[in-house]
C-alpha cells in the first residue's frame, strides 16, 4: 500500500517522462534483436527457404519510418574466362529517401593455374536495359582459388523489391561475342556453356622429340570477334631422346597444327604459347603447356593433330594423332 500511495502523488509530468524512457528501452531492445539477425555485411539473413524474404531494417514497430530489406537466394552458376561464377544472393536495402541500394553477392572460382581478374567486360541489366550506374567489385583470384565479388547499384524506388530483382541479369561479355548471362529471377535460366574435359591422349614422335598428349579441354572463346567459336586445348608433355644435339632443341607453338572436321588446317594459336628448350633425355611436363586451337562451334567431329619441327626440304614425315570430339 505504501508503494501505491507514493506513486499516486507523482506529478503527471514525471509519469510522462518515465513512459517515454520505457519506449526508448523497448526500441533499443528491438534494435538489438534486429542487429542479431543481420550478417556481417549488413544484409539481413533469410529466415526461410522462400525465394525472397523481407526483414525489418530499422524503425520502431508501428511507426511510419519502417523500412524492409529484401533478400533473395539466387545460387546460379555460369562460366566465363576460366572462372566458375556463382551469383549467391541479391539484397535490396531501402534508404530514408524512398529509394534503395541493391547488392549482388558473387563467388569467383578460378579454374586456371594463374592469378586472374575477370575482365571489366561486364554489365547489369535491369528490365532489359544496361544499368550504367552499377559498380563492380571483381577480385584478383589466385590460380585454383576462390574469392568474393559483388555488384552494387542504386534505384529510385524501393517498392516491389521482389519484382525489381526479377528484372535483373548479371552479364559477362558483349552481345556480339560469346556471353554468359545469369538472371536473378527464380524462373530464369543461365545462358552459359560449361567447359568440358576431353579424353584425348596419344603420342607423336619426330626424330629425337616425343610429344605426348595427356588431356584436352573445350570451352567457348571469349576473345572479341570470335562469336560462335570454341577453344580446343590439348595439354602436352615433351620428351627428349638421347640424340638431342648439344644446346637443346626448341619446341614452339607453330610446330603444331590441326585439321578440323570441315577440312580447315589451323596453326596453334599464340594465346597459349609453347616455348620450351628440350635437352637430351629430358622430360618437360609443364602444367601450362597447352596447344590451343580456335575452332568453329559446334566443335564435334574428327580431328587430326600434327607435330612438325622440320620445315626444310627432305624433312621426315610429320607424325599425326587422330581423335574425336563428341
Image (cartoon, helix red, strand yellow):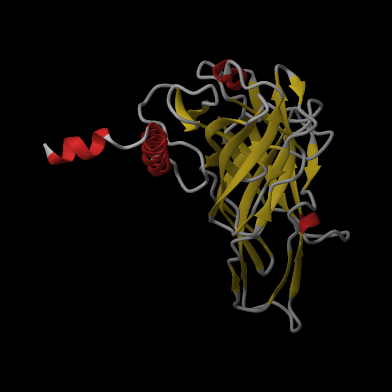
**In this picture, residue 177 sits left or right of residue 188:** right
Closer-to-camera residue (127/298):
127
Q: Quadrant of the C terminus?
A: top right
User: Residue, x 65% and y 38% (percent of image)?
Assistant: 151
On screen, residue 304 versus residue 166, left or right, reads right
Q: Nearer the viewer, residue 213 or 25?
A: 25
User: Measuring 54% from the left and 18% from the top, which residue is drawn there?
Assistant: 162
Q: How many dots with numbers? A: 0
Extreme residue in the bottom direction: 246
Does the image show residue 296?
Answer: no
In percent of width and height, residue 180 lies at: 66, 30
**Residue 90 at x, y = what percent?**
55, 31
Asked if residue 210 is positioned above or below residue 74 in the image, the reply reads below
The quadrant where residue 166 appears:
top right
Among the 4 quarters of the image, the one containing residue 114: bottom right
Query: Is residue 308 shown above or below 100?
Result: below
User: 95 or 231: nearer the eye?
Assistant: 95
Q: Return the residue found at the far right.
A: 313
* Left or right: where 173 falls relative to 234: right
Residue 62 sits in which quadrant?
Answer: top left
Report x, y in % for residue 38. 44, 41
* 96 vs 208, nearest the viewer: 96
Q: Is residue 178 left or right of residue 202?
A: right
For the point 62% across and 63% down, which residue is it?
Answer: 210
**Camera sees residue 55:** yes
Q: On the rendered image, what quadrant is the N terminus found in?
A: top left
Q: Residue at x 73, y 54 (%)?
A: 272
Amino acid at each position: 500500500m505504501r508503494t501505491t500511495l507514493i506513486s499516486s502523488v507523482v506529478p503527471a509530468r514525471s509519469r510522462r517522462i518515465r513512459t517515454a524512457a520505457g519506449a526508448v528501452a523497448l526500441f533499443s531492445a528491438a534494435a538489438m534483436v534486429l542487429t542479431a539477425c543481420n550478417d556481417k555485411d549488413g544484409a539481413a539473413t533469410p529466415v526461410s527457404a522462400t525465394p525472397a524474404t523481407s526483414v525489418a531494417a530499422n524503425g520502431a514497430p508501428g511507426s511510419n519510418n519502417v523500412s524492409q530489406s529484401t533478400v533473395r537466394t539466387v545460387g546460379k552458376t555460369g562460366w566465363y574466362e576460366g572462372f566458375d561464377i556463382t551469383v549467391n544472393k541479391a539484397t535490396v536495402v531501402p534508404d530514408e529517401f524512398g529509394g534503395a541500394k541493391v547488392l549482388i553477392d558473387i563467388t569467383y572460382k578460378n579454374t586456371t593455374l594463374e592469378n586472374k581478374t575477370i575482365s571489366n567486360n561486364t554489365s547489369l541489366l535491369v528490365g532489359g536495359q544496361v544499368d550504367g550506374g552499377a559498380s563492380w567489385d571483381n577480385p584478383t583470384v589466385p590460380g585454383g582459388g576462390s574469392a568474393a565479388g559483388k555488384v552494387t547499384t542504386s534505384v529510385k524506388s524501393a517498392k516491389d523489391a521482389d519484382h525489381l530483382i526479377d528484372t535483373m541479369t548479371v552479364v559477362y561479355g558483349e552481345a556480339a561475342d560469346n556471353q554468359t548471362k545469369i538472371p536473378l529471377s527464380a524462373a530464369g535460366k543461365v545462358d552459359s556453356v560449361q567447359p568440358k574435359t576431353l579424353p584425348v591422349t596419344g603420342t607423336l614422335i619426330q626424330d629425337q622429340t616425343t610429344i605426348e598428349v595427356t588431356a584436352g579441354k573445350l570451352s567457348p572463346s571469349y576473345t572479341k570477334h570470335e562469336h560462335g567459336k570454341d577453344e580446343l586445348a590439348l595439354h602436352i608433355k615433351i620428351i627428349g631422346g638421347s640424340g638431342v644435339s648439344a644446346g637443346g632443341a626448341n619446341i614452339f607453338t607453330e610446330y603444331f597444327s590441326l585439321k578440323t572436321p570441315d577440312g580447315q588446317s589451323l596453326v596453334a594459336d599464340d594465346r597459349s604459347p609453347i616455348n620450351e628448350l628440350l635437352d637430351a633425355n629430358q622430360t618437360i611436363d609443364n602444367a601450362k603447356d597447352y596447344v590451343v586451337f580456335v575452332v568453329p562451334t559446334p566443335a564435334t567431329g574428327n580431328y587430326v593433330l600434327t607435330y612438325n619441327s622440320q620445315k626444310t626440304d627432305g624433312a621426315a614425315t610429320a607424325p599425326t594423332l587422330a581423335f574425336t570430339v563428341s
